[in-house]
């Protein structure tokens, strides 16, 4: 159900039925619905890689919206993204792009959120490695704000590499932005200026950098989120001026009163220090 904030009119999703979903972190661990042998615990799958499977995709059993899927990226319960074989990490990225394209083109969809919650502090309810993709009947507020920013800019702010470079290759730049709301936050920016993840040009390169970002987050507190920021035409006429990217946020601090009350942030880690740390041991 979509509700709107009484004052600002901003949309939000009310999904009380999701309160009933299993939680690995609250209860004594019960059977893991994402482990091999328990496939009957999930809705019928819409995609799989490998036989026996190494990755699988199925609708979320506790959907927040009409289109909400889970991408399980490994059959191994304790695996992290950086533990995946390079071919499986690349297959995961290809699945992200495939499912993104399907959802973006579904009826009534105005936005698609593709993200990973890894660890309890990042909002995960199940520990087994997975990502989620969720379509909304409204343009997500962040997407619409950033779309306005791209539309206003004389030149693309992301093409200008607005931060301290952590690593780069022919296809992507991984950077700590000059201005970020959270400590150790980083962006994976494709070198090709394009509004969205599809068509996907270099899945292997993106998979390698996502794995590095996952490993770096594991060295901090372990929990992290990554979010794909896409700007499809359905989000507004300014899409061609926009530049998609991935944001990775290690969860080392909680939001406090100033952040919640002002909507602005106080970040205690400089981008130089963040880049040095995320680069990791030589
Ligand atoms: Zn499991
Ligand atoms: Zn650009």
Image: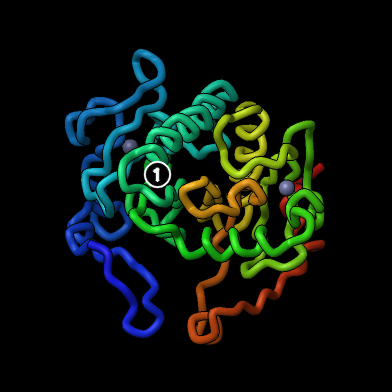
Q: Identify residue for label 1.
A: 133
Residue 266 against residue 45 in the figure, above or below: below
Q: For label 1, count other residues whose C-alpha is less than 10 Å away and answer few (under 14), some (14-19) or many (20+).
A: many
Where is the N terminus found, in terms of image quarters? Answer: bottom left
* Quadrant containing ligand 1: top left
On the picture, is 64 further left or further right than 195? left
Q: Residue furthest front?
A: 237
Say which residue appears at 62% left-offset and 57% top-offset. 220
Q: Residue at x 40, y 31 (%)?
A: 76
Question: Is disc 1 placed on a helix, strand or loop?
Answer: strand
Residue furthest to the top in view is 51
Considering only vertical position in the picture, is 82 above or below 280? above
- Residue 167 in view: yes
Q: Nearer the viewer, residue 139 or 174?
A: 139
Q: Nearer the viewer, residue 181 or 100?
A: 100
Which residue does the image show at 27% across and 52% down from the upper left? 65
**Would you place residue 267 above or below residue 276 in this image?**
below
Colour mode of the rendering: rainbow
Q: Quadrant of residue 201?
A: top right
Say whether residue 116 is visible. no
Question: Which quarter of the picture shows residue 182?
Answer: bottom right
- In the depicted view, which residue is nearer to us: 83 or 228? 228
Q: Is residue 19 left or right of residue 245?
A: left
Image position, residue 62 (x, y; %): 22, 49
């Amino acid at each position: 159900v979509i509700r709107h904030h009484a004052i600002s009119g901003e949309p939000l999703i009310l999904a009380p039925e999701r309160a009933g979903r299993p939680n690995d972190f609250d209860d004594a661990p019960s059977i893991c619905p994402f482990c091999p042998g328990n496939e009957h615990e999930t809705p019928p799958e819409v995609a799989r890689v490998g036989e026996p499977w190494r990755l699988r995709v199925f609708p979320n059993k506790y959907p927040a919206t009409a289109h909400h899927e889970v991408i399980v990226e490994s059959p191994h319960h304790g695996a992290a993204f950086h533990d995946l074989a390079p071919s499986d990490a690349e297959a995961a990225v290809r699945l992200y792009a495939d499912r993104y394209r399907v959802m973006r083109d579904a009826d009534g969809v105005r936005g698609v959120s593709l993200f990973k919650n890894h660890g309890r502090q990042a909002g995960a309810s199940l520990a087994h490695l997975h990502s989620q993709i969720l379509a909304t009947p409204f343009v997500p507020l962040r997407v619409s704000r950033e779309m306005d920013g791209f539309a206003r800019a004389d030149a693309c702010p992301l093409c200008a590499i607005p931060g301290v470079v952590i690593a780069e290759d022919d296809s992507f730049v991984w950077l700590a932005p000059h201005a970020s709301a959270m400590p150790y936050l980083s962006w994976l920016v494709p070198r090709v200026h394009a509004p969205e993840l599809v068509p996907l040009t270099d899945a292997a390169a993106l998979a390698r950098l996502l794995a590095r970002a996952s490993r770096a987050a594991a060295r901090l507190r372990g929990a992290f989120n990554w979010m794909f920021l896409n700007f499809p035409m359905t989000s507004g006429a300014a899409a061609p001026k926009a530049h998609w990217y991935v944001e990775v946020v290690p969860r080392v601090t909680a939001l406090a009163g100033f952040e919640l009350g002002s909507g602005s942030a106080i970040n205690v880690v400089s981008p130089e220090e963040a880049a040095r740390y995320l680069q990791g041991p030589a």
